[in-house]
Amino acid sequence: MLSKLQQQKVMDSIAAAELATSGELRVHLEPTCHNDPMARAIDVFYELGMQATKQRNGVLIYVAYEAKKLAIIGDQGINACVGPNFWDSTRDLMLKHFKEEQLTEGLCAAISEAGKQLAHYFPPVANDQDELPNQISFG
Ligand code: CA
Ligand code: CA
């Protein structure tokens, strides 16, 4: 799906975004999604143990690339302080790139945008730890 170089670009984008926020971002890719991508993203979020952050501020970018479905979800710490349209700008950016078959670019742009959005509510903390690995997971 993504070459090693493309995967590295995505991981680098996560690392860069996490410099500006205490939020933790992850990406999950799989070909198909048989139900609602939001429901599937929530399942994946827990399968990946993404609730294991101190501020409950993990964010999952979920993409079913053949089904062309996607969802962005944040943990309860984020939902407690943002509105329901919080991820719209991130989703729109990603969709724009995906329409041109630019999966890597779409992911990197979305990660960067999500990081910026998160930084308003979750600025970096002293002695920041990488609470969730900056890796892509594949379904
Ligand atoms: Ca961190
Ligand atoms: Ca991380």
Image: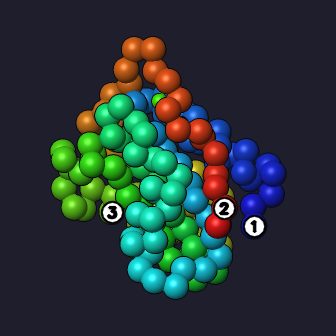
Could you say which disc has been placed on residue 88 in the image?
3
Q: CA distance from mark 2 to mark 3?
A: 24 Å
Among the 4 quarters of the image, the one containing residue 115: top left
Asked whether the viewer can see residue 61, the reply is no
Could you say which disc has been placed on residue 1 in the image?
1
Q: For the residues carrying marks 1 and 2, which lies nearer the camera in this image?
A: 2
Q: Position of residue 64 (x, y in %)?
A: 57, 73
How packed mark 1 is, by other alpha carbons closer than 10 Å (few <14, some 14-19, many 20 or more), is few
Q: For the residues carrying marks 2 and 3, which lies nearer the camera in this image?
A: 2
Could you say which disc has been placed on residue 103 in the image?
none
Q: Is mark 3 within 8 Å of ligand 2?
A: no
- Which amino acid, by three-letter code, is at mark 1? Met
Q: Which residue is mark 2?
A: 138
Q: Is residue 101 left or right of residue 37?
A: right
Q: Is mark 2 within 8 Å of ligand 2?
A: no
Q: Position of residue 112 (x, y in %)?
A: 49, 45
Q: Which residue is pictured at 39% across the width and 14% down the height?
A: 126
Q: Position of residue 87 (x, y in %)?
A: 33, 58
Q: Is residue 125 left or right of residue 107?
A: left
Cβ atoms under marks 2 and 3 closer than 8 Å:
no
Cβ atoms under marks 1 and 2 closer than 8 Å:
yes
